[in-house]
Image (cartoon, rainbow, N blue to C red):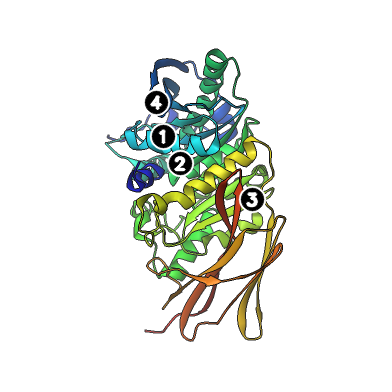
């Protein structure tokens, strides 16, 4: 497959007031997901042999949401020579299966050494007047604010689709392999990363870990304020929410209730399961240091992987080979899943940013000796690093300790973090620290 295909795979009506709106229906996330669905069903459509391995093509009906029946495609990819495992990666994404998705899935499955499942049509779209993606999510938020019907926010049915797909995959694996999948590592990118966070918050014991990609926006109220502070305005990428009056966040009881329902930060006490957060350093959606607004609040085992010189699709623009452009994100996810498939603990990292002898310093302690380490450094006139180039700098490795030093910026702002190299069963991968921004914006 090409790196461009891989990158694409990663990223992948009229309003009528009804009885439901008038009755102001209430439904928190846990209640919504647990609600029985009489329409739920699945069937195996095709078992297809390919040069890479077997593709099992399933069709599933997950639920009836606002009188709309949601249907999904699930594909399970089993590379040749790879046996089923009790733990499975469940990647949720939009659209339908494609050659790019299939190539991406087989690449992951080969690196993980286990079959993987891709859940498509998250969300079902277009809906509600031909709306898609963020425009559709924003529409459902507005409808909640107008009707007080808590079934409206689109993230709820998106999460439920993931939960119902676990039901289907377990039944399928028991029938096909005589070995049911018992636990899942849930992942997805952007709003599907948002869905992954909230799936972890349901408390479903089958969710062993989560790996949300490029959804660096937990603690949403503060994130909006931080964008204004860093960019001078909200990112143009979230215009669907600003244009509908959802940002700045309305100061109403209903708006506060809405954000408490959909902000994963509000479920942080329920998110103690292991989590790998994957972000691109040049993602135009979020501020460079957005993670710092919620990292310390996250409980349980947690790791972050920053991909330097990469945007929302996680393709590294400074790499010449298309496949190399996406390997860092793919290897990080595969290694995380493999660690939890074989129950081999990930390296534990702790770090501290401070100053020493007039320099900016970061000190990292690792539970395992890394194979290498480096600093990534970027400079910008302001705190807006979306167009900045990240440059590799030397870090000193002394056993399990890593130290990096950077000169403070003479003008403008500087951002930096440390990246450490590891390997599991021949698969190389990286882990990162938080980003620190130093300096003062250049006055215009």
Q: Pointers 2 and 4 in contact (CB under 8 A)? A: no
Residue 94 seen in render: no
Per the image, the residue denoted by label 4 is 73
Whether residue 7 is visible to the viewer of this picture, yes or no, is: yes
The circle drawn on residue 122 is 1
**Which residue is disc 3 drawn over?**
302
Separation of disc 4 and disc 1 at Cα?
10 Å
Nearest to the observer: residue 181 or residue 243 = 181
- The mark nearer the N terminus, 3 or 1, is 1
Residue 267 lies left or right of residue 98; in this view the side is right
Q: Position of residue 354 (x, y in %)?
A: 66, 75
Q: How crowded is mark 4: few (under 14 residues within 10 Å), some or many (20 or more)?
A: many
The tag earlier along the polypeptide, 1 or 2, is: 1
Location of residue 123 with respect to 433 vertically, above or below: above
Q: What separation in Å lies between label 2 and label 3 (alpha carbons)?
A: 19 Å
Residue denoted by label 2 = 192
Q: Position of residue 2 (x, y in %)?
A: 34, 44
Tell me the quarter of the image containing the C terminus.
bottom left
Q: Residue 268 vs residue 278: left or right?
A: right
């Amino acid at each position: 497959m090409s790196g461009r295909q891989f990158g694409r795979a990663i990223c992948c009506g009229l309003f009528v007031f009804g009885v439901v709106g008038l009755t102001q229906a209430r439904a928190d996330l846990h209640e919504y997901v647990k609600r029985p669905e009489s329409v739920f069903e699945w069937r195996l459509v095709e078992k297809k042999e390919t040069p890479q391995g077997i593709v099992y093509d399933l069709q599933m009906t997950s639920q009836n949401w606002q009188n709309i029946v949601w249907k999904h495609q699930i594909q399970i990819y089993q590379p040749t020579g790879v046996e089923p495992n009790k733990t499975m990666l469940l990647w949720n994404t939009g659209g339908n299966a494609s050659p790019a998705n299939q190539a991406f899935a087989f690449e992951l499955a080969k690196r993980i050494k286990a079959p993987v499942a891709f859940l498509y049509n998250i969300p079902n779209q277009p809906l509600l007047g031909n709306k898609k993606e963020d425009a559709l999510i924003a529409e459902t938020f507005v409808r909640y604010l107008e009707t007080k019907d808590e079934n409206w926010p689109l993230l709820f049915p998106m999460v439920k689709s993931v939960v119902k797909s676990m039901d289907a995959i377990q039944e399928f694996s028991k029938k096909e392999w005589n070995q049911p999948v018992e636990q899942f590592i849930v992942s997805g990118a952007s709003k599907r990363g948002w869905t992954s966070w909230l799936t972890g918050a349901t408390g479903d014991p089958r969710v062993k870990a989560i790996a949300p990609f490029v959804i660096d926006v937990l603690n949403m109220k503060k994130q909006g304020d931080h964008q204004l502070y860093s960019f001078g305005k909200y990112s143009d990428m979230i215009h669907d929410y600003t244009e509908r009056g959802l940002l700045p966040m309305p100061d109403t009881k209903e708006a506060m209730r809405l954000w408490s329902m959909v902000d994963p930060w509000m479920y942080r006490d329920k998110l103690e399961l292991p989590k790998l957060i994957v972000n691109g350093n040049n993602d135009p959606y979020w501020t460079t240091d957005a993670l710092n607004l919620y990292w310390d609040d996250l409980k349980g085992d947690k790791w972050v992987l920053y991909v330097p010189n990469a945007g929302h699709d996680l393709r590294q623009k400074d790499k010449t080979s298309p496949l190399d452009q996406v390997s860092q994100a793919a290897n990080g996810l595969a290694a995380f899943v493999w660690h939890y498939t074989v129950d081999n603990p990930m390296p534990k990292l702790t770090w501290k940013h401070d100053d020493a002898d007039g320099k900016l310093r970061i000190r990292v302690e690792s539970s395992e000796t890394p194979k290498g380490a480096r600093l990534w450094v970027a400079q910008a006139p302001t705190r807006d690093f979306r167009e900045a180039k990240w440059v590799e700098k030397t870090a000193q490795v002394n056993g399990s300790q890593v130290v990096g030093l950077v000169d403070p910026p003479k003008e403008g702002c500087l951002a930096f973090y440390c990246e450490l190299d590891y390997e599991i069963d021949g698969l190389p991968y990286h882990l990162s620290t938080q980003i620190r921004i130093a300096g003062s914006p250049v006055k215009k």
